[in-house]
Image (spheres, helix red, strand yellow):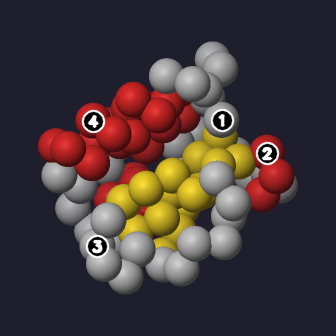
Amino acid sequence: CVGCRIVKSKRELVRIVRTPAGEVVLDATGKLAGRGAYVCRQKTCLLAALEHERLEKALETSLTADQRAALLAAAESFGD
């Protein structure tokens, strides 16, 4: 997990992908093409990944305000 940095199996994590088109999206299937990073299914882990810019480093891109907002909105469905 790029948020808490704990090693877990892929099935316990959610994948976030930077697609070849430059979009940053949650990958529910785990099969979208592009550069991916894994985060625990916890809101705190996603927040930590965003706050410390670990997600940007893992995806090798800068996140726009809209992309951050979309990820935070998706994180509302995560447990804590």
- N-terminal-most mark, 3 or 4: 3
Q: Would you name the residue on which mark 1 appears? A: 41
| Rendering quarter of residue 73 | top left
Q: Which residue, given by chain and number where applicable, does mark 4 sit on?
A: 69
In the depicted view, which residue is nearer to us: 19 or 10? Answer: 19
Secondary structure of the residue carrying numbered label 4: helix
Q: Secondary structure at mark 3?
A: loop
The amino acid pointed to by label 2 is: Glu
The label nearer to you, 3 versus 1, is 3
Height in image: 25 above or below 35? above
The alpha-carbon separation of the residues under discs 1 and 4 comes to 17 Å
Quadrant location of residue 4?
A: top right
| Disc on the earlier residue, 1 or 2 | 2
Q: Residues within 10 Å of mark 4 (few under 14, many from 20)?
A: few
Task: Count up the numbered dots.
Answer: 4
The reply to whether residue 22 is in sight is yes
Q: Is residue 46 above or below residue 27?
A: above
In the image, 76: left or right of 50? right
| Residue 10 screen position, x and y as percent | 78, 57
Marks 1 and 4: which is nearer the front? 4
Question: Gap in Å between the C-alphas at discs 3 and 4?
Answer: 16 Å
Residue 5 visible in the current orientation: no
Residue 17: x and y, percent?
Answer: 48, 64
Comes first in the chain, label 2 or label 4? 2
Q: Secondary structure at mark 1?
A: loop
The residue shown at (23%, 55%) is 63
Residue drawn at the location 27% of the way across and 35% of the way down = 69
| Badge 1 vs badge 2, beta-carbon distance below 8 Å | yes
Which residue corresponds to mark 2?
Answer: 12
Amino acid marked by disc 4: Ala
Reading the chain from its start, which is encountered first: label 3 or label 1? 3
Q: Nearer the viewer, residue 29 or 6?
A: 29
